[in-house]
Image (cartoon, grey):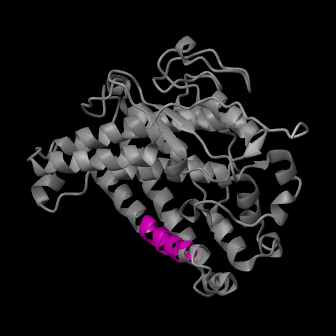
Amino acid sequence: EQDAWRVRLAMVRVPGEPLDDHLERRERELAAGRASGWPDQDATHEFTAAIVFTRALLVQLVGAMERVAPHVFHRDIHPRNMLVEVSPGKPPRFGLVDFGLAVDAERWRAGEWRERGAAGDCRCWPASAWLYFGCGEDEALDARPRLRAEYQERLDLHAAALTAMEVFARLSPAKPQDAVGQRQGEPPMCRRLASLWNLKRVWEEYWTHATRFWRVVFWAFSSGGDIAELKAACLEVSVHRIIQQCLVAVRSAIHEARRAYANDGAEDVVGESSDSDANAFDHASASAFFGALAALISCGEEQAEPAPAWSQVLAMLDPHCAPGMCKSDGSAHRACGAGGACDSSAHGDAACGGALAVQEGRVG
């Protein structure tokens, strides 16, 4: 018909493959390498590579969210909603996609959060989201000021931390069963390895609980189950308290890893790695990485600290890098204007995740 019309959306194409697919392939490659007889010393190598890769992700994601946060809350950050492009000799480039659950930040802070239920991948929910999901009433959070503040301000911060933790854990080696493997290296190296294996263990305990609850929720929604009954069951077993206890343990383990690197002096590198920027990754960088993780993660009613600004987290990741001017390799590039096209060739090797995310966010 002559009066018919169409809506067309022009969007920047984010290069790369789904981050979850990349992690699955890397897990298979690492498992094959271990089965072929890698020496125990490669535990240090694997942890180094995991930290370098995850730090690159976190720098780009935090840089993107610094630009996005004034406009929207994403509400669904996790590896299934991220892309990664890996090229030989270059740092990985990440993209954040799927703004289908995003909400206007100003209206959210003004009270719209009361009108919207918990959403997204519940494995990345903080304790407040689980309580809100179970109760279905904002009064439940009003009666708990710390949980209300967490739900209002920390959803994306917390999800960024759990995304990074999932990536780090999946790329990290399992703890050896033999005593020799557990005592490898000099005492400082032993302390670092012990703290990292403990962090992986505590994270996996959290992930086991979160995945168990996620499966129940997913089954109920996908099969037409009784949602009211599901929510009542979540309250009955105090899912939010179980999640909170696990997250407290994870944050404590993160601090332990931070201290292990901070207290071991300024050795040149954490270990050998095939990543292009590993040679610039010293113990101070590792300690700063874990410090930023601890600042991002939220622990429900045990969370006394106010939510940090994204710019503060970015500064924690690299104290020498001004907010809005960081690349994953620690050097600086010109910040793209919000909403403007990002020509990555003008900025070197790192992806300008902020501009990509803001553009996708505005379309969504």
Q: Which residues are magenta?
A: 206-218
**Does residue 214 belong to the magenta stretch?**
yes
Relative height, residue 317 to residue 136 (above, below): above
Relative height, residue 209 to residue 83 (above, below): below
**Does residue 56 belong to the magenta stretch?**
no
Residue 154 vs residue 199, the one in the foreground: 154
Residue at the farthest front position: 1
Residue 295 vs residue 231, the one in the foreground: 231
Relative height, residue 359 to residue 134 (above, below): above
Q: Is residue 287 left or right of residue 101?
A: left
Specify the quadrant that holds the C terminus: top right
Q: Is residue 228 visible?
A: yes
Position in image of residue 233 (x %, y %): 61, 86
Position in image of residue 349 (x %, y %): 47, 19
Position in image of residue 37 (x %, y %): 8, 47
Q: At x 62% / y 22%, what residue is drawn? A: 322
Residue at the farthest top position: 346
Residue 34 vs residue 86, the one in the foreground: 86
Q: Quadrant of residue 38?
A: top left
Position in image of residue 117 (x %, y %): 75, 67
Q: Main secondary structure of the magenta part?
A: helix
Q: Is residue 290 left or right of residue 199?
A: right
Q: At x 62% / y 80%, what residue is drawn? A: 224
Q: At x 16% / y 45%, what residue is drawn? A: 33
Q: Is residue 187 visible?
A: no
